[in-house]
Image (cartoon, rainbow, N blue to C red):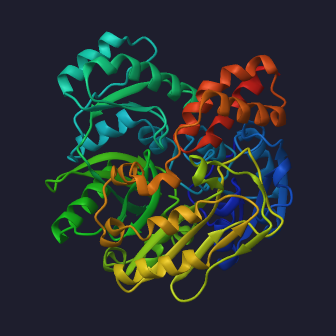
Amino acid sequence: MTERAGPRPPSRILVANRGEIAVRVMRACREMGLEAVAVYSACDRTARHVRMAGTAVPIGGDAPADSYLRIDRLIDAARRSGADAVHPGYGFLSENAAFARACRDAGLTFIGPSPEAMSQLGSKTTARRLAAAAGVPVVPGTEEPFGPGATGADVAEAAARIGFPLLVKAVAGGGGRGMRVVTSPGDLAGAFRAARSEAGTAFGDSAIYVERRLDRPRHVEVQILADHHGAVLPFVERECSIQRRHQKVVEESPATGLSGELRSRLRQAAAAVARSAGYTNAGTVEFLLDGEGDFYFLEMNTRLQVEHPVTEMVTGVDLVHWQIRIAGGEALAISPERAQTPAGHAIECRVYAEDPDRGFLPSPGRITAVRVPGGPGVRDDGWVEPGTDVPVHYDPLLAKLIVWGADRGQAVARLGRALEEYDVRGVATTLPFFRWLAGQPSFVDGRCDTMWLDGLLQRPEASAFSAPDPSRAEVAAVVAAVAEVAGLATSSRAEAVEDARVAASMGRGWKARARLDALRGRNR
């Protein structure tokens, strides 16, 4: 173990990730005159982030469990390359306190919060208690998790106290995994079993908790930066209400229709949560807003968010630059006026290699052509180019399309124009879905909540994008194909089918890959 006196400016940063976020971080390193080190799995050896880096280190096989999730190999790659800092990006180990601690123990600067803060906020029940203690409203629910020894009767007792409708939710993770909506007592036992099983599969932690389900809430979040000198700076809020089965689809900043007083209260609450955990670096505090103008703490993400560019576009603040500067011990030098007074409006769409005509199932393959939109107010954060292979092993995010306008009306019009220009060939993408979505009257008018898109997709005019959940036989065929690539024994494939069917029905069929990786490791 190497002892360190305190933060010090990094000079060579290992980017412990891949895809568009690795490219994003490496660009920031170049702008700051810092060296970037890439890591790569076998199938990523020719990927864009590898070619961008001055140094690239192989870390194992294709499966995340053999590469990007291997703490020991990442630490070894940092040592071998002479890196003195690690940026985790998002996904993979970005919210893993053990990884942050391993970096610190190895004498590396972890560009993110401390492992202690990450541990506190990584558990939703612990985070709820912190928020409540800081005077921030939380949705009524259970304060302690239901662990392996909990019974259906225990959950039923809590549900009767909280009232229906409610949500049964995983304590760990996010993205809608391990979550079930329960509208009546008769559905509770099945939802409890399903949520616990899915949480254990997805996150390695089957603990769940129960909270009240708000009626058609909005999802609004506040970006914060916090330095090592006690400053906590909240930014203008982001609207993330357009979701498909609890997965964010479109994000924008600022949120529409909020009073100045409500915006101020949201920022104050976000700062209070961060201070309660002794938080440093970049993070995001998420809230639900009800129809009465009240808000409730949802969770805190202890990393950079996928949607961070919309904040950058309306404030002119480079959040990755400041992540690196804060990790090196610099004091925040951004005025509250700049952070909290948006200049114009920004909207982001996540472009995935998924087929909207087939229930948003993943569409791996080789990119044959790419035409990226341009012009005023258009930004594309991507990693693919002609000849890029989109593998089956990882999140199929290809790019993020971000547009800016002087006001929301101009931003919406610019989004429509940019989507028409955008073209990716060789794999199916979500671009056709976004072209359709951008023309919907409620989207154009900014009248959306977290249940709006799921309801819209049930209408006859949306039939092209509302394919039924894949059948067990269809998913079994997909699992078998992926399992063959993974070298998974035939006897274990059936065990993955139901988990894969659930993941695919949520529009993120690639998450079945995590289950396959776990089974593959079991069979070694």
- 334 is higher (above) or lower (below) than 116: below
Q: Position of residue 332 (x, y in %)?
A: 43, 71
Q: Position of residue 118 (x, y in %)?
A: 48, 43
Q: Quadrant of residue 342?
A: bottom left
Q: Nearer the viewer, residue 119 or 488?
A: 488
In the picture, the quarter occupied by the C terminus is: top right
- 54 is higher (above) or lower (below) than 89: below
- 488 is higher (above) or lower (below) than 77: above
In the picture, the quarter occupied by the N terminus is: top right
Q: Position of residue 106 (x, y in %)?
A: 70, 45
Furthest residue toward front: 460
Q: How many marks?
A: 0
Q: Nearer the viewer, residue 75 or 206?
A: 206
Q: Nearer the viewer, residue 451 or 27?
A: 451
- At x 53% / y 45%, what residue is drawn? 467
Would residue 8 appear left or right of 207 to someone viewing this image?
Answer: right
Instruction: Say if residue 329 shows up in the picture.
Output: no
Instruction: Say if residue 349 shows up in the picture.
Output: yes
Would residue 241 appear left or right of 432 to someone viewing this image?
Answer: left
- At x 59% / y 28%, what residue is drawn? 499
Furthest residue toward bottom: 376
- At x 53% / y 89%, what residue is drawn? 376
- At x 47% / y 32%, what residue is drawn? 178
Q: Position of residue 290 (x, y in %)?
A: 20, 51
Would residue 187 appear left or right of 7 to someone viewing this image?
Answer: left
